[in-house]
């Protein structure tokens, strides 16, 4: 098992973590990868369900790493995964208002946050990617905007900027 510690300095980083550990399916995938490198097919065989979404959210939250597995000659190489961290350390301070926004954004059904996510994605796709201009355009706090971006499958938080992820790309 890897012994690295994930250090969280930004409260918005809790969004994907809470999504992972708030879902029994994602947690089972994480637990299966604690000690072994496993391919997507190995995981699906072990858990009896599709793990694509779990792998994507674990990658986006930075909780798993991947490497290419070389099978027998003549077969196609496959990616295999394992967890990147075994511990977490948090080091941040925020208002209860910001923390309540983070928790609400994390656990709200997608349909309820869809408009906020799509509005943010549209602004970033149009080139409005700096945190200061997004806070003015949306009249929301930077922490709220980062939390919405972390809930999005299309956006990545890069310091004080947001970036549109290309197909298959993760943070």
Image (spheres, helix red, strand yellow):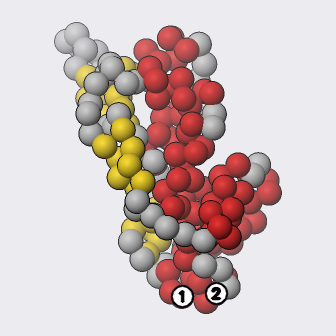
Please name whichever residue, 48 or 86, is drawn nearer the observer in this view of the structure. Answer: 86
- Using the rendered image of the protein, determine whether residue 153 is visible from the camera's viewpoint: no
Please identify the quarter of the rendering in which residue 161 is found.
bottom left
Q: Are marks 2 and 1 in contact (CB under 8 Å)?
A: yes
Above or below, 158 against 6 in this view is: below
- Secondary structure at badge 2 equals helix
Query: Is 4 on the left or on the right of 62, as rendered?
Result: left
Of the 4 image quadrants, the one containing the C terminus is: bottom left
Query: Is 37 on the left or on the right of 97, as rendered?
Result: left
Residue 12 image label: none
Rendered residue at 42%/77% (across/down): 160
| Crowding near the residue tagged with mark 1, few <14, some 14–19, many ≥20 C-alpha atoms within 10 Å | some
Of the 4 image quadrants, the one containing the N terminus is: top left
Give how far across and how far down residue 129 sits, in percent.
49, 78
Rendered residue at 46%/48% (across/down): 60
Q: Which residue, as the protein is rendered here, is positioned at the far left?
A: 73
Numbered label tally: 2
Q: Disc 1 marks which residue?
A: 133
Query: Is 25 on the left or on the right of 9, as rendered?
Result: right
Rendered residue at 80%/57% (across/down): 112
- Using the rendered image of the protein, determine whether residue 24 is visible from the camera's viewpoint: yes
Give how far across and how far down residue 13 sits, in percent.
49, 56
Q: Disc 2 marks which residue?
A: 137
Instruction: Give me the C-alpha separation between circle 2 and circle 1.
Output: 6 Å
Please name whichever residue, 84 or 103, is drawn nearer the observer in this view of the structure. Answer: 103
Give how far across and how far down residue 158 sits, in percent.
39, 68
- Secondary structure at badge 1 equals helix
| Crowding near the residue tagged with mark 2, few <14, some 14–19, many ≥20 C-alpha atoms within 10 Å | few
Please identify the quarter of the rendering in which residue 148 is found.
bottom right
Rendered residue at 54%/23% (across/down): 28
Give how far across and how far down residue 146 sits, in percent.
54, 68
């Amino acid at each position: 098992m890897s012994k690295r510690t994930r250090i969280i300095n930004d409260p918005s980083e809790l969004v994907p973590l809470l999504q992972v550990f708030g879902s029994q399916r994602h947690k089972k995938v994480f637990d299966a990868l604690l000690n072994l490198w496993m391919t997507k097919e190995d995981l699906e065989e072990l858990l009896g369900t599709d793990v694509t979404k779990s792998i994507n959210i674990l990658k986006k939250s930075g909780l798993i790493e991947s490497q290419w597995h070389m099978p027998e000659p003549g077969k196609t190489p496959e990616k295999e995964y394992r967890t990147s961290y075994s511990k977490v350390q948090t080091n941040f301070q925020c208002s209860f208002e910001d923390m309540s926004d983070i928790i609400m954004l994390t656990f709200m059904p997608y349909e309820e946050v869809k408009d906020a996510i799509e509005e943010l994605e549209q602004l970033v796709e149009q080139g409005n990617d700096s945190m200061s201009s997004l806070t003015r355009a949306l009249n929301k706090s930077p922490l709220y905007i980062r939390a919405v971006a972390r809930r999005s499958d299309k956006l990545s938080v890069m310091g004080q900027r947001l970036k549109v992820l290309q197909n298959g790309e993760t943070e």
